[in-house]
Amino acid sequence: MIKQLIINADDYGMCESVTQGILKGLHDGVLTSTTAFMNSPTIAQDLILLKHTSYGLGVHLNVTFGKPLTKGHSFINSEGFFKKPKDYGEKIIIDAKELKAEWQAQIEKFIALTHHLPDHIDSHHNIHLLYPEVFDALAKQYHLPARSITYPCVHFTADKAQLDTFRQILNSYDGTLEIMTHPGYCDETLKQLSSLNQERETELAFWCQREVKEALKNIHLSTF
């Protein structure tokens, strides 16, 4: 059984309903950490809501949602928004220099707004797995822990939001485990932004259950 568990909520700042759902999971549930969209138009205000808290707070490096912070051309559409994964066709091809510049701008914006480094980095749609050299270079440059495939990370989805399944996950690993989750509230704004919508409420409700807290009573909940 695992000894230490990080439960990280992706997509902080996507929209108000997701942000409020993540805050609910942090304050009243067992979430320990979240990663933020630094290109969100509301991110400055959203980050203030986590000021003076002990939760883990990282950057959700992104080139597939919203508008970029830089002027790269290889990842935008004709309207100036990031291309979605489906817009690339069979293979996602992005200029590595442009990708690094964009992701670095997102990290630098985090530092400018919070006055400290993020405690870790990961990426939206796991684009970092396609460009590990860019991701690893930034992690090394800023001395940051990074989500990778070299340590256990479980993508927790709504279909896994059952106590028996959760216990099986806990019993299947030793040492430290990260669980990646997407909690939130569902509203019309979210439905316009993401195909993952109602499922977020299922995940949020799960993380706030008393039975889940009891299942974790002998496990150290941690951040990066």
Image: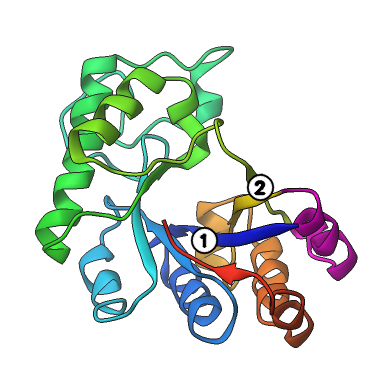
213 displayed left or right of 164? left
| Residue on which disc 1 sits | 9
Which numbered dot is residue 155? 2
109 displayed left or right of 165? left
Where disc 1 sits, the SS reads strand
The residue shown at (27%, 63%) is 43
Q: Amino acid at mark 1?
A: Ala
Looking at the image, residue 11 lies above or below residue 153: below
Mark 2 is surrounded, within 10 Å at the Cα level, by few (under 14), some (14 to 19) or many (20 or more) other residues, namely: few
| Quadrant occupied by the N terminus | bottom right
Give, as a single range, the part of the protein colored magenta: 158-173
Q: Is residue 177 magenta?
A: no
Along the viewing direction, whichever of 2 and 82 lies nearer the viewer: 2
Figure quadrant of residue 65: top left
Q: Are marks 2 and 1 in contact (CB under 8 Å)?
A: no
The residue shown at (15%, 29%) is 71
Along the viewing direction, whichever of 174 and 207 lies nearer the viewer: 174
122 displayed left or right of 217? left
